[in-house]
Image (tube, rainbow, N blue to C red):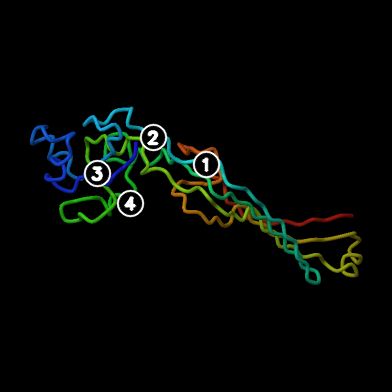
Amino acid sequence: YVEDGFYANIAEVRADPIYSKVSNEEAQRMIGEIKYVDRHGDNQITTEDRAVIGDTNPDFIYGLNANFRWKKLSLGLFFQGSQGNDIFNGNLTMIGMNSIGNVTREAYENRWTPENRYTDVPALKTVSNSWNANSTRNLFNNSFLRMKNITLSYNFPQPMIKKISLNSLQLFVQADNLLTVSKNQGLDPEQDISGLTYYRYPAMRSISGGINVSF
């Protein structure tokens, strides 16, 4: 469904042919609810009003490997990213205030209320259909750039390690998924590259270190 703002007052509700003849109670309930485009002009919102939106195919994907050395220090960097693909965040359909969903802090603090009319977050209600609809509200640009790995290592000088009967000795520290740049509001744009995110676990961020020894 294609979203078109939301109903800020009774006048806007009644101005919509879909709700022009509903009861006062029903009209009052629609204040703060999301408004959808009646693409067929039949004064009702049905499955026929849905549109094909977004494109899950990226314009291009890319990666970069870089290795630097200075004296006994080595630095390795690995970046990867995707550009130009869209993502539907299904998790956001479950943040309404109902018995089975959760509410994000951002949605709760910025929700529509009579005192907070100038917001893009509709009202949160116990009974609401708006949050559960698959609509343009939950479509996002899934372009991202991620530092997949960074490794810093130090190779001890040969004269030093020969004294302890070793061929080589290296200390290293590395981090995986340390930094991600993205406008995606989901948990992980890389996991969501298929075009849909719904109950997916994000890639783990880890920092580790170790010693490489050869005899």
Q: Amino acid at mark 4?
A: Arg
Q: Indicate the amino acid at tag 2.
A: Ala
Residue type at mark 3 is: Leu
Query: Which of labels 3 and 4 is toward the front?
Result: 3
Horizontal side of 203 relative to 186 (left or right) equals right
Picture disc at residue 51: 2
Mark 3 neighbour class, 10 Å CA radius: few under 14, some 14 to 19, many 20 or more: many
* Image quadrant where one finds the N terminus: top left
Where residue 207 appears, as percent x and y from the top left, is: 62, 55
Instruction: Classify mark 1: helix, strand or loop.
Output: loop
Give the CA distance from mark 1 to mark 4. Answer: 23 Å
Q: Amino acid at mark 1?
A: Asp
The location of residue 14, given as percent across then percent down, is: 13, 40
**Separation of marks 3 and 4 at Cα, in angstroms:** 12 Å
Q: Nearer the viewer, residue 9 or 65?
A: 9
Q: In the shown orientation, is residue 100 left or right of residue 66?
A: left
User: Of all residues shown, which one is farthest toward the left?
Assistant: 24
Q: Which mark is residue 105?
A: 4
Q: What's the mark number on residue 10?
A: none
Marks 1 and 3: in contact by CB < 8 Å?
no
Gap between marks 2 and 3 measured at Cα: 25 Å
At numbered mark 4, what does the secondary structure look like: helix, strand or loop? helix
Tell me the crowding category of disc 2: few under 14, some 14 to 19, or many 20 or more residues within 10 angstroms, Cα based.
Answer: few
Picture coordinates of residue 177 (x, y %)? 59, 52
The alpha-carbon separation of the residues under discs 3 and 1 comes to 27 Å
Question: Which badge, 2 or 3, comes first in the chain's sequence?
Answer: 2
Secondary structure type for disc 3: loop
Tell me the distance, in whole angstroms, between the alpha carbons under discs 2 and 1. Answer: 21 Å
Label 4, label 2: how far apart the Cα atoms are? 30 Å
Element carrying mark 2: loop
- Say which residue label 3 marks: 124
